């Protein structure tokens, strides 16, 4: 059974291990295959400054992913998933779908009926995952660092 543990600097080593098990994602999102402690500290600080909720996804005591979301994005007043990453060691075992079901349950409890997310243009596996899970492309966009993304919208199920 998956649980969410609020991420803090005390769990930075878990975050680092999860990210570094995903060199492809790191490469397209951070322009390097391996992140550092400083990169994770910056991620945590950015999440806090944005008002995002950031969690370690845990399965029976093992940290297997990270979920970050923003209840209200000031740019469009929508709920956004900022990050859903599953450890490369356990990808393909249904954890992404299970994490999304858990996220949906939280959003239903909070009265959210739909959410948005951005997927890096180069992340074909993520596009396939989100489309399989009912996401509809809304528009192309560009991140502040110049990376191209597709904005998706999805109804909470």
Image (cartoon, rainbow, N blue to C red):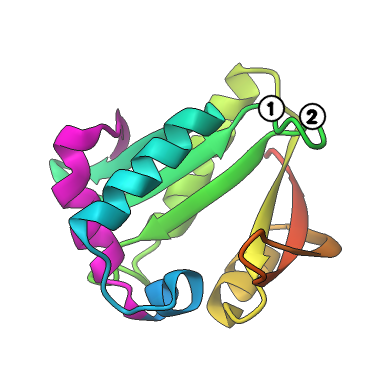
Q: Can residue 63 be seen here?
A: no
Q: CA distance from mark 2 to mark 1?
A: 5 Å
Please tell me which residue is depicted at 32% across the width and 73% down the height of the picture. 22
When asked about the image quadrant of residue 16, the answer is: bottom left
Q: Which mark is residue 93?
A: none
Residue 8 image offset from top left, x and y in percent: 25, 32
When asked about the image quadrant of residue 108, the answer is: top right
Q: Nearer the viewer, residue 134 or 118?
A: 118
In the rendered structure, the answer to whether residue 121 lies left or right of residue 25 reads right
Question: Mark 1 and mark 2 in contact (Cβ < 8 Å)?
Answer: yes
In the rendered structure, the answer to whether residue 55 lies left or right of residue 52 reads left
Seen as rendered, the residue at the extreme right is: 139
Residue 80 image offset from top left, x and y in percent: 65, 41
Q: Is residue 138 above or below residue 7?
A: below
Q: Is residue 153 above or below residue 1?
A: below
Residue 127 image offset from top left, x and y in percent: 64, 72
Residue 21 image offset from top left, x and y in percent: 25, 71
Q: Nearer the viewer, residue 15 or 1?
A: 15
Q: Which mark is residue 72?
A: 1
Q: Dot 1 surroundings within 10 Å: few (below 14), some, or many (20 or more)?
A: some
Q: Dot 2 surroundings within 10 Å: few (below 14), some, or many (20 or more)?
A: few
User: Is 46 contained in the magenta span?
Assistant: no
Q: For the magenta stretch, what is the residue range?
A: 1-23
The tag earlier along the polypeptide, 2 or 1, is: 1
Please tell me which residue is depicted at 38% across the width and 37% down the height of the picture. 45
Instruction: Check disc 2 and report the residue beneath it.
Output: 77
User: Is 10 contained in the magenta span?
Assistant: yes
């Amino acid at each position: 059974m998956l649980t969410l543990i609020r991420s803090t600097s005390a769990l930075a080593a878990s975050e680092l291990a999860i990210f570094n098990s995903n060199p492809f994602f790191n490469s397209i999102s951070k322009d390097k295959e391996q992140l550092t402690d400083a990169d994770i500290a910056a991620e945590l600080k950015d999440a806090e400054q944005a008002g995002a909720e950031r969690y370690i996804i845990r399965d029976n005591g093992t940290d297997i992913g990270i979920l970050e979301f923003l209840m209200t994005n000031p740019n469009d007043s929508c709920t956004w998933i900022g990050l859903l990453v599953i450890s490369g060691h356990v990808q393909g075992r249904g954890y992404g779908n299970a994490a999304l079901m858990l996220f949906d349950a939280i959003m239903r409890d909070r009265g959210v009926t739909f959410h948005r997310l951005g997927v890096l243009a180069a992340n074909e596996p993520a596009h396939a995952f989100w489309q399989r899970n009912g996401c509809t492309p809304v528009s192309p966009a560009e991140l502040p660092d110049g990376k191209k993304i597709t904005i998706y919208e999805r109804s909470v199920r």
